[in-house]
Image: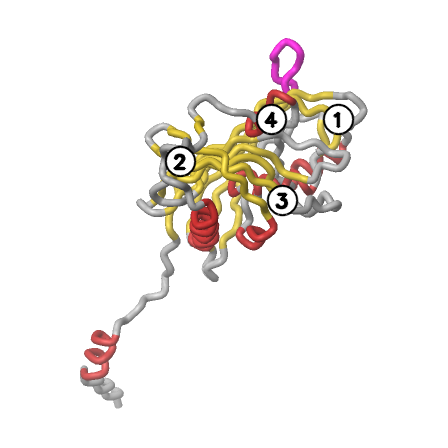
Amino acid sequence: MKMQVFRNSAALFLVTCLVSFATTTPRAQAWQTNETGTSKSSGDSPPIDVEKIVRAFTAKETEFRHALAEYAFKRDATVQTIGMGGQITGEYHRTSQFVFNDNNERFEKITYFPLPTLTELSVTQEDLEDLGGVQPFALEASKLAQYDFKYFGKERLDELDTYVFDVAPKIVPKKVSERFFQGRIWVDQQDLQIVKVRGKGVPEGNQRFPVFETYRQQVDGHYWFPTYTSADDELIFPKGNSVHLRMVVRYTDYKRFQSKVKIVDVGDSEELKSQPTPSPAPKKP
C-alpha cells in the first residue's frame, strides 16, 4: 500500500480491483510478545515433537487448500480510514459470491460494490495479493518449505487446546510482489489444523501492510475454513505520514460444489444395458 493523494486513476483502479490491508505499528506486533493465556512447555509436561507437529499441520494445510477449491462461499470486505476524531473519512465495501460456472470453474460474482470513497491510500497489486492470500490463509501450500517454524508454547483458545508457532520466511525476498506471511499461528491439538493467525504480509519495501487477525471455524465437520479477518491500526509510511485504517472481512455460506454430471454406478449401467431397446414406431403411409 502506498501513501498518496487520491486521484481519478486511483479511483478507477479501486472500482475494478478488490483491496486488502494490514497494520504495522508497535502495538500491532503482538505476536512477538508473550500473551496472557499462552504458556511454554514446562519440565513436567511430556516432550513436544515439534517437527512431527509441523509436518502434520503443513500437510493438513495443503489438503485444506485443495478442499477449499471445491467450495462456493460469500466474502464481504469493508475497509475504512479513520480521522483524528474517530470519524470515518473513507470507505471501500465490496460483497462477492465465489460460485461455479457450467465448466466447474469458480469465479467471483460481485453483488454489492458502491463507489469507494478512500482518499488517503493508493491500492497496489500486493494489497490484492494479500486479500486473497496471506490474510485468509497465511501459509501458501506451495511455499511451506520456505518457512521457519519456531515453537512458542500452548494456549487455550476458547474451547480449543492449541500449539502456538511463530512463523517467518527463511529468506525475505527483495521483490515486494513475492508475498509471504510473517507472524503467529495457532494449531488445534486434536485436528492439527490452523485455527487462528495473526501477522502481516512481507516484504514491505516502501509500502506498508497492516497486521491482521484471521479466525477459522470448522466446516462440514472436517476442515477449518477462514470466517473472519480484521485489522485496526496505523500505517506509518517512510516519510512519517500515517493513516489509521480499519478492516473487516467476513467469509460465510460455504457450500461444497455439486457437479451437474450424473454418475451411474456399475450396477445401474448393467441394468440399463439389459433392458430391451424399444422398437421405433412405424411410419404413417
Q: Identify the residue under disc 4.
A: 29
Looking at this view, is 18 or 48 the one in front?
A: 48
Q: CA distance from mark 2 to mark 3?
A: 22 Å
Say whether residue 267 is left or right of residue 98: left
- Of tags 1 and 3, the one toward the viewer is 3
Disc 3 residue type? Pro
Q: CA distance from mark 1 to mark 3?
A: 23 Å
Q: Callout 3 environment at 10 Å: few (<14), some (14 to 19), or many (20+)? A: many
Label 3: element kind: strand
Looking at this view, is 23 or 18 the one in front?
A: 23
Q: Residue at x 49, y 24 (%)?
A: 35
Dots 2 and 3: beta carbons under 8 Å?
no
Q: Residue at x 59, y 28 (%)?
A: 79
Q: Quadrant of residue 281?
A: bottom left
Q: CA distance from mark 4 to mark 1?
A: 16 Å
Q: Identify the residue under disc 1.
A: 237
Q: Work out which residue is located at the far bottom of the displayed protein and give it.
A: 285
Q: Earlier in the sequence, mark 4 or mark 3?
A: 4
Q: CA distance from mark 2 to mark 4?
A: 20 Å
Looking at this view, is 192 or 50 the one in front?
A: 50
Q: Identify the residue under disc 3.
A: 169
Q: Earlier in the sequence, mark 2 or mark 4?
A: 4
Rendering coords of residue 73 (x, y %): 44, 44
Say whether residue 138 is left or right of residue 19: left
Label 2: element kind: strand
Q: Quadrant of the N terminus?
A: top right
Disc 4 residue type? Gln
The circle drawn on residue 162 is 2
